[in-house]
């Protein structure tokens, strides 16, 4: 892990750094996290590390283990499916409302996000691909004009990034994901709410099926 400079949102920075290690596979399911080691690696005190670990524990990314230990939580297929099902409904709503309210803005500003996403995919960097994906969906949430969309999804997005990391490490062909994103953006820009909603639901549930099949068939680690 690279060392961090002290800033007001240091706890968030530490959380993001730990999450990046988990999403990229550097910290595997079942692996123990030690506050002292993380603090030393990041060049910070133990306090922001302790707070960051508590956040990740509350968000389901970490789990308590015997001996007062914290470990990376295993990915559970049922929970992943339920999370994606919930997200598909909300993202579908966001896409539909974005098309109805901000088609012009989507047409003007959206292509730059698609291009950035394609560049991230070509780079092969899991953190960059995750960040690009998050920015695209955050843009749609903003376009939809319903503040409850982002706030409802927010508690799940940290876990979602962890799931995305597992997907992107495998044979997911991330550039095809951006083809799907571009098709959704085109529907929004055309003002076609029903099509945008349908495409969003299909996109998200396709990702869910891929991830779940990986958990079940490839036997990804489920803890130690």
Image (cartoon, rainbow, N blue to C red):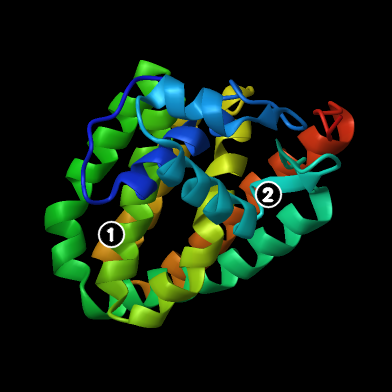
- Up/down of 147 relative to 200, above or below: below
Instruction: Tell me how far mark 2 sits from mark 1, CA to CA.
Output: 21 Å
Asked whether the beta carbons under mark 2 and mark 1 sit within 8 Å of each other, the answer is no
Name the quadrant containing residue 165: top right
201 relative position to 194: left or right: right
Name the quadrant containing residue 120: top left
* Closest to the observer, 202 or 29: 29
What residue is rendered at 52% in x and 65% in y? Answer: 155
Question: Residue 139 has which mark?
Answer: 1
Q: Position of residue 24 (x, y in %)?
A: 54, 26
- Up/down of 72 relative to 26, above or below: below
103 relative position to 76: left or right: left
Name the quadrant containing residue 214: top right
SS label for mark 2:
helix
Q: Position of residue 25 (x, y in %)?
A: 61, 24
Which residue matches tag 2?
208
Q: Residues within 10 Å of mark 2 (few under 14, many from 20)?
A: many
Where is the C terminus found, in terms of image quarters? Answer: top right
Q: Position of residue 186 (x, y in %)?
A: 30, 56
């Amino acid at each position: 892990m690279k060392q961090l400079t002290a800033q007001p949102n240091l706890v968030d920075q530490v959380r993001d750094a730990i999450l990046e290690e988990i999403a990229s596979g550097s910290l595997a399911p079942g692996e123990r996290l030690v506050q002292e080691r993380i603090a030393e690696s990041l060049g910070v005190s133990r306090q922001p590390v302790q707070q960051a670990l508590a956040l990740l524990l509350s968000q389901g990314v970490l789990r308590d283990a015997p001996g007062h230990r914290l470990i990376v939580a295993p990915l559970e297929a049922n929970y992943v499916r339920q999370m994606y099902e919930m997200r598909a409904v909300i993202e579908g709503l966001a896409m539909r409302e974005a098309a109805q309210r901000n088609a012009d803005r989507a047409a003007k500003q959206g292509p730059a996000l698609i291009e950035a996403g394609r560049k991230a995919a070509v780079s092969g960097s899991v953190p960059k691909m995750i960040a690009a994906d998050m920015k695209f969906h955050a843009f749609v949430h903003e376009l939809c004009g319903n503040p409850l969309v982002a706030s409802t999804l927010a508690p799940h997005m940290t876990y979602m990034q962890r799931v995305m990391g597992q997907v992107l490490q495998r044979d997911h062909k991330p550039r095809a994901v951006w083809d799907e994103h571009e098709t959704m953006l085109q529907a929004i820009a055309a003002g076609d709410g029903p099509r945008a909603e349908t495409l969003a639901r299909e996109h998200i549930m396709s990702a869910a099926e891929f991830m779940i099949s990986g958990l079940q068939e490839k036997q990804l680690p489920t803890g130690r």
